[in-house]
Image: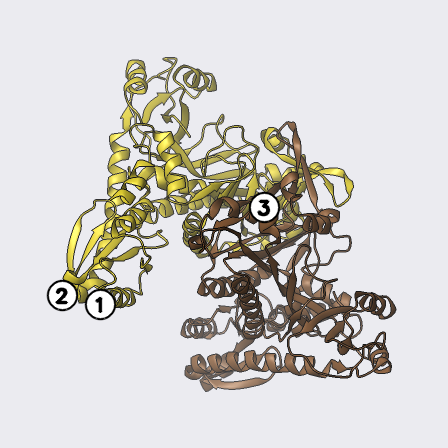
Chain colours: A brown, B yellow
Amino acid sequence: MAEQKKFVESITPRDQDFTQWYTDVCIQADLIAYSNLKGFMVIKPAGYAIWENCQKELDRRFKETGVQNVYMPLLIPENLMKKEGELVNGFAPEVAWVTSGGTEPLTERLCVRPTSETLFSDFFAQDVHSYRDLPRLYNQWCSVVRWEKETRPFLRSREFLWQEGHTIHETAKEAEERTQQMLNVYADFLSQELAIPTIKGQKTDKEKFAGAEATYTVEALMHDGRALQSGTSHYFGSKFAEAYDIKVAGRDNKEQYVYQTSWGMTTRIIGALIMVHGDDSGIILPPHIAPIQVMIIPIQQRKEGVLETAAKIAESLSEYRVKVDDSDRSPGYKFSAQEVSGIPLRIEIGPKDIAAGKAVIVRRDTREKIECAIDELPAKVGEELERMQKEMLERAEKHLEAHTFAAHNTEEFEENFKGTKGFVKAMWCGDPACEEKIKEKYNVTSRCIPFEQEHLSDVCVCCGRPAKKMVYWGRAY
Amino acid sequence: MAEQKKFVESITPRDQDFTQWYTDVCIQADLIAYSNLKGFMVIKPAGYAIWENCQKELDRRFKETGVQNVYMPLLIPENLMKKEGELVNGFAPEVAWVTSGGTEPLTERLCVRPTSETLFSDFFAQDVHSYRDLPRLYNQWCSVVRWEKETRPFLRSREFLWQEGHTIHETAKEAEERTQQMLNVYADFLSQELAIPTIKGQKTDKEKFAGAEATYTVEALMHDGRALQSGTSHYFGSKFAEAYDIKVAGRDNKEQYVYQTSWGMTTRIIGALIMVHGDDSGIILPPHIAPIQVMIIPIQQRKEGVLETAAKIAESLSEYRVKVDDSDRSPGYKFSAQEVSGIPLRIEIGPKDIAAGKAVIVRRDTREKIECAIDELPAKVGEELERMQKEMLERAEKHLEAHTFAAHNTEEFEENFKGTKGFVKAMWCGDPACEEKIKEKYNVTSRCIPFEQEHLSDVCVCCGRPAKKMVYWGRAY
């Protein structure tokens, strides 16, 4: 018990201090360690294994839509970076510059990639010649560097891992469709694998990606009511094509510029996973993404037959990701370890269970205990994993619904941001000045103009002029 | 035929100019493109897919030995880099330095990782406390930067992709065993998946990794008789542990330093793959690693039933990595495209074949044509892929054997490096001065002291003093 207590005491209760709870959980669940360098973290095995599963699921989905993986250089010459003005202006304050290579200073500074539109554009310009070469549907898995001032594990760090997709197309329509398609891939992945429901929509001009004509986003709601941008998809029109001269001979034999997209998802989604599903005992991993789905914990493991039975059970569950904790620790310690690291199911098996031919399954999220005959475990475990996956999504959906508020007028808008935490839907005139004013006054940002529009009133909650769109507002990470 | 010719003409014959052939093939097989920045290349889909398969096969093998993946920062503070003197001296001439982040100059330069011993060591120092925490068996997949002067695609570039394994252990013996174990993993992977036989051995002190007590290597022989270091595994003893203070409480309750290893394999092996197996028509991919194993090429595809049959055949071969080339191009063009990109088998299927209920399988390496009943294709394709894999390894083994020469005395040693191309085995006194002398005189380097020693004579081929070891010599890439 003493050992078990140690684990619990080291995590700040979630409702007492969510920020501290988050940090505690990242450390206690062994996901990361801080490095010597501010804003750069070490992703430890338990954290990286989650990312590997995310990669596997995303990569499969990308490839099903015809996307191919490539690799672009880490460093970008300054003059190449500067060809498209908006992008460079957007990223200039937060890039890291390499100024010497080997023993000599460089004649031109090189930027450590903060994103690779410039490199892909430069490459596309030499890669395509005819409309027959289109579309090009490329993606890369890599790390990027952005010199953020405030940093937090997974959520905002100076280096993060991600995938960045870059595609070029013959027509604007096709490119726009691809932008939507990839946003749907993200939403589907988040909901089906991470059990995270999202709001799909378009960013306002103020919040869109530097250089994009349109940015689409999937916005998730954390347990504490804050919003997290969880994946974005950008439509560039021909802006980069013009800056980097990406031209092809069209169907009419005339030269034409291509239409371009990019879309990215980062290790930040591990932060979302923690903040949507975690509790006071640690993280809770949805079964589909959990690196270990079932931890078998032998009770009185020195008694004859216990470890053998645990091993046999593990073998019978080989279609799942299963492990036996046969370390020297006490069962209590093992329970805590399994709980803090969010392993969906544990199976307790001791001499009495063996005598009765049964075992106990304990669900991480509900702590529900389910007795099960040993030979029925394979079917039961599969059932429970799927049930847990489904119920985690349902709970997250309910939380999202319960923390989304409609503001029909200015008073309701104000009221919502004082008393409650979550998304507030409200009508907007479309003027960036109102957006700015709301941001300053309530410390909230526009999250998106959702695809599913509602008509809450005729006028903007800020200025009272005629409303054009309904917007989701929230406090972001 | 005109189209087919175009392909063939664009590749310089291998025996006319091997270096040019290599570059031609990298470009024609669509593996890479040159970027705007010297020494940094774009790895295109066909090249990256090969790397993905290598990653999959290596990663599986690593995990089977208990290794876990992690991720360490891209940038290394200068003072951290400097803690171990030999490593920093070894790498100082070839690192890139970041000197500003965001809008401000940094107070301390940051080095773009050329390798991550320093970061892992710094992390291990905080990560382990007791011998019970050992071993730690970590690996990361990432890119590194080394400011090479001469660069060539895959073989030597300023940025390359690799995996770097880093482990710490309680005892020297265990660490040394791990070093050997991972070398064996590399040798097994190269031989079983890439069909590349290697010589396993130890590097001389002159050629070992900066900071290592011992470096082990797998050395492969290219078609032109040059040697390629294809994977290395290092034993560090406690050198880094002392520099970075990686201590644990030992079994006797006293503090002790840990024992450390690292081991790496890079995208360079794609270069090896090309240079061991390729021919005048392009690259040849061993079936186990080929992203596409079978290309089905319909003949007279506009005739009724041809494309349908091709699709049906593809479906029947779904256990393999199979594709149908149903583009508008002529069959001749498609044959060339399949050949240049090294796809192991092609299946030709036209109206006459369909009428006869058969298809023609053509092997990429031997160009052997095999008639096969359509409904027997699934079994036959599996057989042919395995036969090709096996024969490619056998051919490479024969080539290695035929190009490995034993020099029993100085004359034979000289003779071999004049007249022939390949490895020369010869006795060595162990004095680095002789190693240096041989290097200068014959423009060859010691590749390794092979584990399988032979006794070729009693004296060193250089100085005539008593010999200690047999060494493999060769010209390297």
Q: What residue is at 75 percent from the left and 38 percent from the top?
A: B108
- Look at discs 2 and 3 and give the one toward the viewer: 3
**Quick check: A245 above or below B133?**
above
Name the residue nearer the viewer: B121 or A215: A215
Query: How many angstroms separate mark 2 from mark 3 (CA)?
Result: 52 Å
State the image coordinates of residue B91 (x, y, percent, origin top left): 59, 32
Q: Is residue B93 left or right of residue A467?
A: left
Identify the secondary structure beneath mark 1: loop
State the image coordinates of residue B106 (x, y, percent, origin top left): 76, 40
Name the residue nearer the viewer: A397 or A242: A242
The residue beneath circle 1 is: B304
The residue beneath circle 2 is: B355
**Quick check: A476 above or below B272?**
below
Name the residue nearer the viewer: A416 or B199: A416
Instruction: Check chain identity for marks 2 and 1: say if they share one.
Output: yes
Query: How many angstroms separate mark 3 from mark 1 (CA)?
Result: 45 Å
Can you say which quadrant of the picture contains the C terminus of chain A?
A: bottom right
Q: Chain of mark 2?
A: B
Q: Are marks 3 and 1 in contact (CB under 8 Å)?
A: no
Q: Chain of mark 1?
A: B
Name the image quarter holding residue A73.
top right
The residue beneath circle 3 is: A244
Q: Is residue B167 visible?
A: no
Q: Chain of mark 3?
A: A
Please state which amino acid type lies under the numbered disc 2.
Answer: Ala
